Image (cartoon, grey):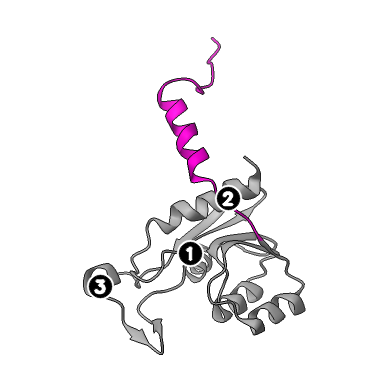
Amino acid sequence: MSWETFFATQSRVMALRSTCRRLAVGCVIVRDKRIIASGYNGSIRGDVHCLDVGCKMVDGHCVRAIHAEQNALLQCARFGISTEGADLYVTHLPCLQCTKSIIQAGIRRVYYEEVYRPDPYAAELFEFAGIPVEQVHSDLNALLRALARQEHGLDLPHIHK
């Protein structure tokens, strides 16, 4: 599995934690082939979740949920982790507001899996900032196969004494 597919798959796994009914989005931020932060779309800490009470809709958007990219970037801010020069993997093409945050955070490259409500101005801003945006694909099936092999002892590393 390539690194791009591996991290795209990790973002897809993060999306499993999403608490918004409308769209499950996951994100990982990576530096030097190491995940430094992750996020998914959901409510602020301590608030009710869309899964429990429904989405809070304004102009066709759920305003209760914080986007996955924002949650990952805010996790870095909260714990003092620099995002300068890191790569961001997300299940869905970033919206305009997330695009602005990604640029301001110093992310150097964005990988996404699915197009969702593409914003022409967001694309323009990424181009202006010189940030490549590339579509990649996750492979949850490969992850499941690898886990199954490990569970049966087929891929476990041999320990030499």
Residue 87 lies in the magenta-colored region = no
Q: Which amino acid type corresponds to the residue marked 2 in the rendered image?
A: Phe
The label nearer to you, 3 versus 1, is 3
Q: Residues within 10 Å of mark 2 (few under 14, many from 20)?
A: many
Question: On the image, numbered disc 1 is attached to which residue?
Answer: 75
Residue 141 lies in the magenta-colored region = yes
Q: Quadrant of residue 107?
A: bottom right
Q: Nearer the viewer, residue 80 or 68?
A: 68
Percent of width and height locating residue 83: 62, 64
Q: Which amino acid type corresponds to the residue marked 3 in the rendered image?
A: Val
Q: Specify the segment rendered in magenta.
A: 135-161
Q: Residue at x 45, y 26 (%)?
A: 150
Percent of width and height locating residue 153: 44, 20
Per the image, label 3 sits on a secondary structure element best described as loop
How far apart are labels 3 and 1 at the CA level? Answer: 20 Å
Q: Is residue 15 left or right of residue 104?
A: left
Question: On the image, numbered disc 2 is attached to which residue?
Answer: 7
Q: Which amino acid type corresponds to the residue marked 1 in the rendered image?
A: Gln
The label nearer to you, 3 versus 2, is 2
How far apart are labels 3 and 2 at the CA level? Answer: 29 Å
How far apart are labels 1 and 2 at the CA level? Answer: 18 Å
Percent of width and height locating residue 58: 37, 88
For the C terminus, the image quarter is top right
Instruction: Mark 1 or mark 2: name the one nearer the start of the chain.
Output: 2
Q: Residue at x 22, y 74 (%)?
A: 53
Vertical side of 80 occupied by 2: above or below: above
Vertical side of 133 occupied by 61: above or below: below
Instruction: Mark 3 or mark 1: name the one nearer the start of the chain.
Output: 3
Direction left: furthest residue: 53
